[in-house]
Image (spheres, helix red, strand yellow):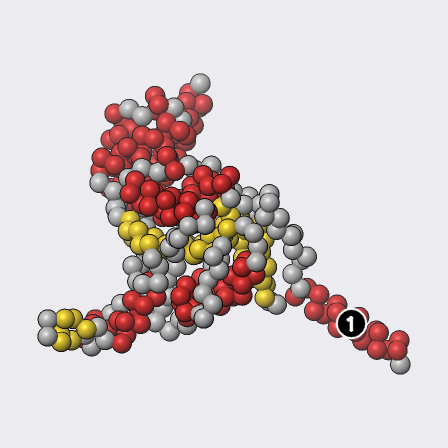
Amino acid sequence: MDAELTQRLMQLLERVEHWLPPAPEQVDWTTHVAALWQRHPLGGQLVPVPVRDGVALDDLLGIERQKLALLDNTRAFLQGLPANHALMWGARGSGKSSLVRALLNSLAPEGLRMIQIDRHDLSRLPALVEELRYLPQRFVVYCDDLSFEGHDDAYKALKSVLDGALTGPPDNVLLYATSNRRHLLPESMDDNQASRLVGDELHHGDAVEEKISLSDRFGLWLGFHPFQQDVYLQACAQWVSQLGSPQDWDSAARAEAVRYATLRGGRSGRVAWQFANHWVGTRRLHAAASG
C-alpha cells in the first residue's frame, strides 16, 4: 500500500512540476539595487535585475523642475526625512520613465533600492510592502505606465497601500508611478454631469470624487509636457554627440531632426533619442560602405 501511495504521489508531482517556478535567486540588497516582481501561477517572487542602462540625470533635458523635485524628495526619503509618494503624469515619451531610471543610477550609491511591479500585479502590493517593512534598506516601489479602466478594481490595493490601511505604508517604502493620465482612471462626460454648484462652490459627484481620491494620495505630482522645438533640438544634439561625436551634429542633422519629429507627429525626449539612433547609425553605415 505504501509503495502504491508513493508511486501515485510521484505521478502527481510529475504532472504539476512544470507549473512550479524555478527556485528564485535570493535578492541580496547589499549588492543588488533593483528587482522585478515576477508573476507565476502560484503567486510571485522578486527577481534581481541589472540596471538597464547608464542614463544620468544630466542626460535628460527639458525637465529641470521635475528632476529637482523628484531628486529632493528621494534624497529626503533616503535620509529618513518626510517625503511623498510621487505621480509623474503627462505626454508620452517626455522622460517620465527615464527620470526614474536616472534617479536609481544616481542615488543607488546613497542607498536607494527599487522594485518594479506591473499594474496587473497590484493585488500583491500590500503583501510585498509588508515584506519590505522590516528590511534595513529604503525602497521605491515603482509602477510604470499606470492606469486603470472603469471596471478595474486593482486600484483599490494601491489606494490601501498609499493611505488607506490602518498601519499605513512603512517608513522605508515610497511608491512612484508614471502615467499618461493625470487621475489614473478614465474620465467621461457622464462623470461631470453629477457635479453641482452649492453657493459659489463646485461639488463633484461621487464618480469624480472616487477617481480623484486615488491620484490625490500621491503627495508629489509632476507634470510632463511635449517639448518646444528648441528643447527638442538640444536633446537631439546631446544624444547625437553621445552616440556618435559632436561633429555628427550639423545643419543637415538639425534639418533632418525637424523633419523626423514632424513625421512622428510630436517632439519629446524619446523622439530625440530615436532620431539620434537613426542619424548616427545611418551615417556610420554609409561611411563604412563607402570606405
Q: Most extreme residue toward the top, as rendered?
A: 291
Q: Is residue 278 visible?
A: no
Q: Is residue 197 above or below residue 267?
A: below
Q: Is residue 96 above or below residue 148?
A: above
Q: Is residue 25 above or below residue 191?
A: above
Residue at the (39%, 53%) spot, across then down: 82
| Image position, residue 192 (x, y; %) | 20, 72
Amino acid type at circle 1 is: Gln
Residue at the (31%, 37%) spot, across then down: 61
| Image position, residue 85 (x, y; %) | 39, 56
Left or right of 287? Residue 34 is right
Left or right of 153? Residue 65 is left
| Image position, residue 225 (x, y; %) | 26, 48
| Image position, residue 78 (x, y; %) | 46, 47
Q: Most extreme residue toward the front, as rendered?
A: 81
**Residue linked to disc 1:** 11
